[in-house]
Image: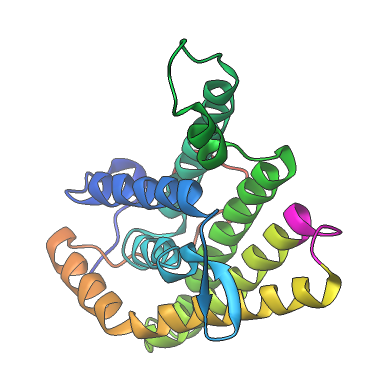
């Protein structure tokens, strides 16, 4: 399929995928504080579904190209920042007399600034790395072996995401050995989720390529991550 420059193409499903990506990120933001037990590891419940955001990134980059996916990552980033800032404002507004739920709102919505900052940086860096690695691997493999680039990009991106978040948000709060164990377990679990979802990723990618009549190769793409709009 011949690729048309992204700035003159209109896609049927791009906006839907963007909305789903933003929704999943906001869900992950608000539920990250719930800790569950997976075998011997206490981890955030988000390790079970946050990797889906990387699947969105895989689909976007594989079908629509790096520039479109980079633009979506910026939208996700700004949505997450706006939501986080509003949550902080909400918890500091005095409740009405007789309202009994303020403490619950504060516990669920409140975050210390370094946790918010760590989450924002980790999301942006991880998303950009995921899409960059996948786009480059697509060129190296000439579009073959989709599984190698979806899993390979996830290994790189989830490692960066997990290291950045835990280091920025929890360094000197958790003991060093627990911090390292949490990083490794979170990274491994997220990667396993990506592997499990690989057949689903194949189906979605192949379906979208046919429906959108697009299979973008980033041969002439500017990979500067600071460009906000699609090229």
Q: Is residue 109 above or below residue 89?
A: below
Q: Is residue 63 left or right of residue 90?
A: left
Q: In this view, does 127 lie to the left or right of 171?
A: left
Range shown magenta: 167-174
Name the residue at 59% across, 51% down. 124
In which quadrant of the rendered view does residue 138 lie? Answer: bottom left
Residue 23, position as x, y percentages in the image = 35, 46
Identify the image quadrant of residue 200. Answer: bottom left
Which is nearer the eye, 33 or 191?
A: 33
Question: Is residue 170 located in the magenta-colored stretch of the structure?
Answer: yes
Residue at 56% over, 25% down:
91
| Closer-to-camera residue (114/3) | 114
Is residue 32 in view from this perspective?
Answer: yes
Q: Is residue 91 above or below residue 209?
A: above
Spot occupied by residue 198 in the image (x, y as percentages of width and height): 33, 82
On screen, residue 202 above or below 89: below
For this view, does 32 lie left or right of residue 211? right
Q: Where is residue 29 in the image (x, y as percent from the top left)?
A: 50, 48
Q: Can residue 231 be seen in this view?
A: no
Q: Does the magenta stretch include residue 54?
A: no
The residue lying at 43 percent from left, 15 percent from top is: 98
Single out the residue that lies furthest toward the left. 211
Q: Where residue 53 sits in the image (x, y, percent)?
A: 42, 60
Which residue ends up furthest to the top in the rendered image? 97
* Marker count (numbered): 0
**Vertical arrangement, residue 39 with respect to residue 84, above or below:** below
Quarter assignment of residue 205:
bottom left
């Amino acid at each position: 399929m011949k690729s048309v420059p992204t700035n003159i193409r209109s896609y049927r499903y791009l906006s839907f995928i963007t909305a789903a990506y933003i929704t999943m990120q906001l869900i992950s933001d608000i539920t990250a504080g719930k800790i569950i037990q997976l075998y011997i590891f206490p981890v955030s419940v988000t390790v079970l579904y946050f990797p889906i955001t990387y699947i969105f990134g895989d689909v976007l980059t594989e079908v629509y190209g790096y520039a479109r996916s980079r633009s979506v990552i910026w939208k996700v980033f700004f949505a997450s920042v706006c939501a986080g800032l509003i949550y902080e404002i909400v918890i500091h507004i005095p409740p009405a007399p007789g309202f009994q739920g303020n403490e619950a709102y504060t516990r669920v919505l409140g975050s210390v600034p370094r946790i918010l900052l760590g989450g924002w940086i980790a999301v942006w860096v991880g998303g950009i790395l995921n899409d960059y690695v996948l786009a480059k691997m697509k060129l190296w493999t000439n579009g073959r072996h989709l599984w190698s680039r979806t899993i390979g990009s996830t290994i790189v991106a989830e490692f960066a995401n997990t290291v950045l978040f835990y280091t920025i948000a929890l360094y000197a709060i958790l003991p060093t050995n627990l911090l390292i164990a949490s990083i490794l377990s979170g990274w491994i679990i997220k990667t396993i989720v990506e592997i499990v979802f690989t057949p689903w990723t194949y189906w979605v990618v192949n379906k979208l390529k046919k429906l959108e009549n697009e299979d973008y190769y980033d041969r002439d793409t500017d990979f500067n991550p600071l460009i906000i709009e699609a090229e």
